[in-house]
Amino acid sequence: MIAKVVTDVSLDREFDYLVPAELESAVRVGMSVDLRFGRSKRTGYVLALAEQSSYPAEKLRPLDGISTERAHIPENLISLGRWMAEYYCCSQEQAIRTLLPSAVRSGKVRAKSRRIYYICDREGAEKFLAENADAASAAQRCAVLRALLPGGLALEQLRLVPDFSRSSLSTLMNKALVAVKEELVRREPWSEGEVLPDAPLELNEDQKKALARVDEIIRPDAEKRVILLHGVTNSGKTEVYLQAIAKVIGQGRTAIVLVPEISLTPQTVRRFRARFGDRLSVLHSRLSDGERFDEWNRINAGEVRIVVGARSALFAPVKNLGLVIVDEEHESTYKQSEAPRYMARDVAVMRGQMEKAGVILGSATPSAESMYNAACGKFILCRMPRQVAGRPAPLMHVVDMRLQPAPEPGKSAVFSAELLDAVRQRVEQGEQCILFLNRRGYARVMHCEQCGFDACCPECSRSNHPVNYVYSRSRATLSCHLCGSVVSAYEKCPECGSPDIRYSGTGTEKLEAMARGAFSFARIARMDSDAMKSNEDYEEVLERFRRGDVDILIGTQMIAKGLHFPNVTLVGIINADQGLSMPDFRAPERTFQLITQVAGRAGRGNSPGEVIVQTRQPDNDAIACAVNFDFDGFSEYDLEFRKMLDFPPFTRLIAVHFRGEDEEAVRSYGEEIVKALSPYVLEGTSISAPLPAPIERIKGKFRYVVTIKGRKLKVLRQALRILALHRVPPKGVEMYVDVDAQSIM
Ligand code: ADP
Ligand code: ZN
Ligand code: ZN
């Protein structure tokens, strides 16, 4: 027998090894094996087993053995990994690495155990207690035995027993009444506090319809495996997920629930915990290596029926998978930004297909891709257009900022008169407000009134393409949001020495300062990635807001999603046009989603909510449709626009990126690759010349991109994969492939 093995050396190659006869019955696909590679001892994973090798048998080396130290990858995941390597043009090793958390892969983290003392001869122990009940000399030994009768204890627990002594324990062990064993200890990840169990709710009609379709997709012989659940916020999607999961675990199967990292809050987890208790494992980014190791092993051992987590939870080693749920399926964070650049939503659909499991993609604002797949009949579309309990939708007001009176000199018109009034009124009534601005920092541009100098990042700017520094007043710094470089703010213009410096453009930091001026009566907090240094900061601000110690919460997209605060009755969107000017075909979609989501934060309690949308483009389709809750209208418009420009979902899009400090070398390597690909460019496929990316330069590196579009790209993708992994670019030039690119910035 031959094992095709991928080693931990990144070569994107499978190597053939002989399986020694004594291992033949034990070796399986996915197992971690010890082997010799060149002169070194290494480990590898078995990707496949075969009868024959294309190499002569005398040239093959035998496997040294099956690794006892490293985890084995379940076979079903190996198939998924191989598909990912092929589809996303990454190496086999990168794909395999994605399947296992590094804590598990490294072999460095060990299971934690402790020594437990227990009664090994119950009859003898009881006899000893009966015979020595009154003997003062045996009091210590009796105390130890009595403490151990209900179950084994660790030494530190025994020490708490009155009358305990080491010597009495030793005596009992010598008498063979007590023994000691190593017991695994599970490192307990954060707990959500005490969670009381709850029962399934009586479903409404829309929910019942959706749940009925779940039966169809979880059948082993199902024709369609994917439901696109388009339900407005508060329509009860989560309740449908919970009951769908209950169905599959009732069949003895398992479920995986993916949520965006940012929504993986204790609030979310509690709902799953209340329904499923210990059968649930939560994988979030704050787990320590040890906790992650333990959770993985618990899942792998079949102790867990449901896994909830962010993107990588998709690779949880559950067996007998029945259902994968991808909540907020439109989220761009499901796309991994480094290799393998996979889209978890799409890989979830693939895993479902491979393991005959159903897949539910849920969202209030489904992605254009999923709407298209539903329209083509690939996905089953279920709609839940109504909120539970008939809560009224929030009132949406559009304020056209072009019609606002000009601000007094030296002041900027951040708040419209309508927003000023509304906030004042809500705070006076003891209600809470959210002010949303998707731009952090204080001001965008530091400008010299004397000579016209604008502060720009020298590493990211080009002569015709300035990249402005963002000013932070509290830190007195200028920073570049592209490359992250930071310099101290200038007190005088570095060009002409004038102190006459003006700042324009508004970020959340400035918004906070202005809000403190305009609403001096209110308690204000800000939440964005500048203000939040850790997850504890984040939780702390949310907790204060929840308790009602904050009246106005200001923030970026960090506060747009998932938060449930019943006392928030007003949401102000400061500049709804923010993202529209980005040179990105998803800009309208993101704008629509963001407004819809932020608006969903208002009126989640008993009082109806109100949303004030400030914009200079009230007629823009994305904004107008969002304000009218017109998802279908927007979807139609967006799909039309993408069809016209030949963008996904009407075509597949691969972006090939080239980077380096020497612009000419970068561009010409791009050309070389385009040329090498030309034989594979079939009819209906287009490939661009290497063009400067919309963000042309970051940190001194020039960025070029080749875009490939077409419906059938398999052959071209295979060629591209070989080029990307096996051709060596000139020194100082990097190349990487982004299949199904979310953006080509
Ligand atoms: P979504 O996930 O679509 O935002 P949720 O499932 O969180 O919606 O439901 C919103 C609220 O309505 C939750 O508080 C939930 O407990 C409640 N809810 C959901 N379904 C029902 C139902 N059938 N009957 C009563 N309350 C429900
Ligand atoms: Zn100047
Ligand atoms: Zn920069």
Image (tube, rainbow, N blue to C red):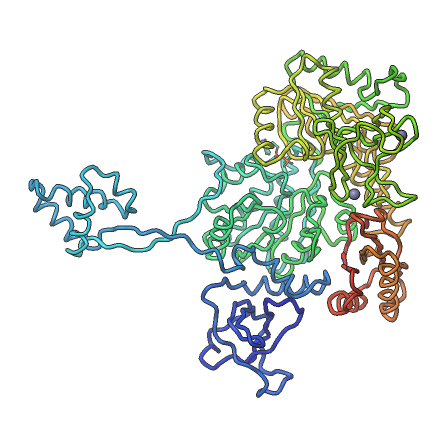
Q: Residue furthest front?
A: 497
x then y, percent, for residue 190 = 49, 40
> Horizontally, is 619 left or right of 11 in the view?
right
Above or below, comparing residue 155 to residue 390 in the picture: below
> Horizontally, is 147 left or right of 417 in the view?
left
Confirm whether residue 211 shows in the render: yes
Q: Residue at x 77, y 27 (%)?
A: 573
Q: Quadrant of ligand 3?
A: top right
Q: Residue at x 7, y 40 (%)?
A: 134
Q: Quadrant of the N terminus?
A: bottom right
> Horizontally, is 615 left or right of 486 in the view?
right
x then y, percent, for residue 689 = 90, 59
x then y, percent, for residue 658 = 81, 57
Q: Quadrant of residue 409?
A: top right
x then y, percent, for residue 532 = 63, 33
Above or below, comparing residue 89 to residue 554 in the picture: below
Front residue of 612/535: it is: 535
Q: Residue at x 51, y 64 (%)?
A: 72
